[in-house]
Amino acid sequence: MALIRILTRLLPLLGCLLASGYLSAQGPQFTIQDLGTLPNLPACNGLALSQSGNVVGYCTGTPGLNLLINSPTTHVFLYSKGAMTDLNVSSLNTPFPTGVNDSGVVVGGAVTVNVATLSGTASPFIYENGKFQTPPAQLNDALPLAVNNAGEVVATSLQISSGSFNFFVQSSAFLDSLSTGTVTQLASSETGGSAAALGINSTGTIAGATVPPSGSGAIPLLWSGSTPTALPQLSGFAYAIATSVNDSGVAAGEAFTINFNVLSDPNAIGHAVLYQTGSATPTDLGALPGDVSSAALGINNSGAVVGFSSSSPPTFSMYLAAFIASPASKYHAFIYSGGKIYNLNNQLVNGSGWQLSFATQINNAGQIVGTGLINGAQHAFLLTPVLSPSIGNVVGAGFSTPGVTSISSNGVFTIFGSALAATSEGLGQLVDNQLPTNLGGTCVESGTTKWNLYYVSPGQLNVLAGQIPTSGTVPVTVVTDCGTANEMTSPAMNVNVAAVAPEFLYFLETKNGENPVAAVDASTTVFVGPPGLISGVTFAPVHAGDVITAYGVGWGPTTSTDPIGTLASGIAGLTSSNSLTLGGKTANISYIGLSPESAGLYQVNFTVPSGLSAGSQPLVLTVDGVTTTSNAVIDVAN
């Protein structure tokens, strides 16, 4: 039927008034990219990531080595635009990078530890404008730990001494501006205490920690300018550090208690933490199931946190384990998102053969860099988020004002949201006169039942509800890549249901709120409405005595025996009580029920009553005591 085809084309283009809804979150999913290796250097770690996707790390000739204990030869790499480049850092023994920005500035250094004497030092490098720069004298014994796009570098002198493996007992924190050549030493919040700067955001806020003169604890800090502000401690932990901070001032880090006088403390504990702005209590992110410790290393502007969880207690290297240790089965990369911690190994859509150990940074695009094992080989990886389908609102497909927020059996409704489909696609050739339940790779489900679809697009789906109860709610989910191994399912939204949810379909929504009902003159087949309503389509007003057919959805049960989703084989009248008025006058109904050769579409054939004034007159249908909205109008002429 020509009208049905036109309505099908128009339906995705109609305006809408959305009821407020809740956009639920689910565990994020990612695709993984193996960053490869350098020639003859098969073991690589991924350490830092810029906002544009530049990655830095290092490769060695032998897998499974710890940089502090084994001191292997390392080659620092920059991965940019699909290519891995050896930066040839030759001035340091066992160098590793810690930061990179969008301009390709790379910072890092080397740390040496003498286990016998409990001593050690750090040395820096700065790579800028395609070559290595001489670090400022103030940073001679410091390790740069982060750089932002403004060229601001934070560094910390890691001087292991005084019989302790605590890197920060006598440390100093610095801010180095590459553009001005100015180096500022950052003050501790404790008189006589030491300071450590570990991360920096795009506006220059610095994350770190301070250690009191006694060395008996650590206090997490944020510096705004050069002013330190202490962050709250997590109850039960003597030490805490902030390792990164986003542009809203929300920081992530680690709270821990450990004996730094031994190389390995079996009683040590460490938990990843989140420091929310204005909150007097940090959030304990805990550890992944089966693990006993964790550390947070990166946070983005969406508040997603990445790090690693471990089945073993933390060692003196603390969060730096992700930089200097090799991947192993005891380490598990995590992301904290939407109030829940997820094992990144379980969030991959193409991760066959991968075991992800460390996630070191996340940028604002949601990309994550880290280190793992691919079929047993030590490689750097880059994760890119896969958009998961999310339902924002569910509303009747007529887009009435106010919106119809209940659905009924054999009722057409619209889902609005994000990532609902890969592309826009309408109905093609039907199979066995049945609307598809998988259209363009998208399915809509209630429980285990798939519902029929008219139209899919990334932001909108038009759906035909199956057989559902007449009251209460039903869960509705959207599945993309439906029927494949990469299926992604939205969180379920509980949608109100009713025996009937009647509304008319409209040709369009007007600014004055009077919406012309999708209707046709039964004798002339001319569309009903003021001339010129839609360009290229003939419209005319109705007159008293004309027989009109108006179309709608959600009108409830009929005498049909056809399965829902099948094109109606014939007429099937409504079984519920019904009445119709036009301009407040009763309209004589000659037929009301399913529209033949359609699915989910209802029609009412009626005679235009006499005595109506010219202009837009409200058309109101009542089914089983439920009325359509009063903004549905028919254009009448005398």
Image (tube, rainbow, N blue to C red):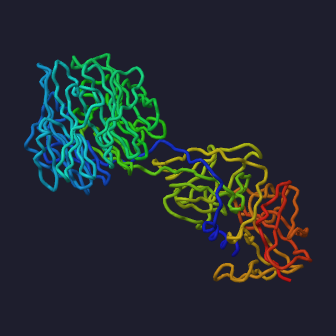
Question: Can you say whether 571 is above or below 537 in the image?
Answer: above
Q: Residue at x 86, y 56 (%)?
A: 575
Q: Which image quadrant is residue 617 in?
A: bottom right
Question: Can you say whether 251 is above or below 404 in the image?
Answer: above
Using residue 75 as the reference point, say whether residue 240 is left or right of it. Answer: right
Using residue 69 as the reference point, say whether residue 246 is left or right of it. Answer: right
- Does residue 4 appear in this view? no
- Does residue 637 appear in this view? yes
Question: Can you say whether 264 is above or below 467 in the image?
Answer: above
* Residue closest to the eye, 4 or 101: 101
Using residue 300 as the reference point, say whether residue 550 is left or right of it. Answer: right
Q: Residue at x 32, y 22 (%)?
A: 313
* Residue closest to the eye, 562 or 263: 263
Residue 106 location in percent, x, y? 20, 48
Residue 167 location in percent, x, y? 21, 27
* Residue closest to the eye, 636 or 445: 636
